[in-house]
Amino acid sequence: MKKDVRIGNRLIGPNEPPFIIAELSGNHNQDLVVAERMVDEAARAGAHAIKLQTYTADSMTLDLDADGFVIKEAKSLWAGERLHALYQKASTPYEWHEALFKRASALGMLAFSSPFDTEAVDFLAELDVPCFKIASFELTDLPLIAHAASKGKPLIMSTGMATLSEIEEAVDCAKTNGCDDIVLLKCTSTYPAEPSDTNLRTIPNMREAFGCQVGLSDHTRGVGVAVAAVALGATVIEKHFVLNRDDGGVDAAFSLEPEEMTSLVVETERAWKGLGHVEYGGSDAELASKQYRRSIYVSRDVKKGERLTEENMKIVRPAFGLAPKHWNDVLGKIARNDLQCGTALGWEHISS
């Protein structure tokens, strides 16, 4: 049984609209005014939550130029960057967190963060965040998951490139340390991600495998993949957010601008509403449209006693006459009374 998860005042589950998280990441370029505007615009766009990332460069990596500490992948957005320098410019100062969280709350949004070490977990717990988000690269950091789980708050965990057994270890670790309210996010840990690498069909499989709510942390451009994820049962959508991609930002290339975030909120809710339930025979909303089906009508004046033929009957719209399936039953029958052109043919018009 996949139970709903409550995060703050929001219920996460299949009977609720998708929970939309605007990930601010480092797109504020370490400008508090920009970060505050991002919160405002996320609220205006209709996002249900904002998310920060809580770390320092020193808590993420070592300040070295050695192999492994410089990004060498030519296709990476951050090719040539030293890890320490990249995290330094992408980090959100700790002293901003409380003010940004309060700003989001005042605008009707939830606010939380991804801690990247146990000290960050403690810091966020003191700010009484409604949940913790474990980033995909940290899914194998079981001590971090254990510490976050011990705080008695829900956990949202991105799975990224984790194997089935690694996800199982993370989920078991969370449960062992006191957290049963878990949301897993299907995630492709490339930046940006290609739709063809997203493999959304994993979502229902993951939901069945782990018996929990499953969503999508989406690094593709646009909103199409996220909308498709909702059709496959995703109950949470996380997308990176930026005020203007042209202004730059560490994640700007695969982040949504405000009007795109609005589209994400609107279209994912439309997709969710469209799921409905299994139904045949038409919905209540369709009842009025049934009159525009076809039926048998008199197409030329017919005298009493005259035979009904293809020359004086037609199958046309609307549907107030006999159904077309009765065409062979009435063909060649005798009219019981005079029938004017346009009469919806009924059994009462035919001699037995």
Image: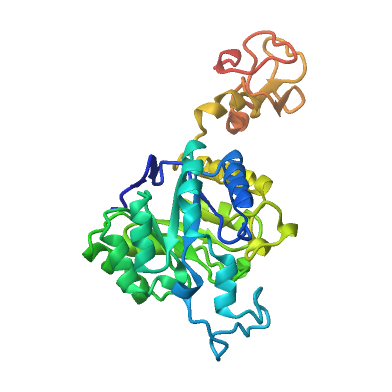
User: Where on the picture, by quarter, is residue 44?
Assistant: top right
Q: Nearer the viewer, residue 151 or 94?
A: 94
Which quadrant holds residue 204?
bottom left
Q: Which residue is drawn at 54% across and 85% down?
A: 69
In depth, the one of 341 and 126 nearer the eye is: 126
Residue that sits furthest to the bottom in the current view:
67
User: Would residue 297 be visible to someone looking at this image?
Assistant: yes
- Up the image or down, 303 lies above or below 97; here it is above
Could you say which is closer to the camera, residue 175 or residue 35? 35
Farthest residue toward the front?
95
Horizontal side of 212 relative to 350 (left or right) equals left
Place of residue 310 in the rendered image (x, y in percent of width and height, measured from the top left): 73, 28
Quadrant where the C terminus sits is top right
Taking the spot 59% from the left edge, 47% from the top edge, the residue there is 36
Q: Where is residue 304 in the image (x, y as percent from the top left)?
A: 68, 9
Which residue: 62% across, 63% down?
220
Residue 149 to residue 111: above or below: below
Q: How many tags in the picture?
A: 0
Q: Can residue 19 be seen in this view?
A: no
Scheme of colours in the image = rainbow
Q: Is residue 99 toward the left or the right of residue 349 in the image?
A: left
Residue 149 coordinates in the image, percent (x, y): 29, 61
* Residue 170 place in picture, x, y as percent: 33, 69
Task: Report the residue at 64% width, 45% height from top.
Answer: 263
> Camera-side residue: 342 or 234?
234
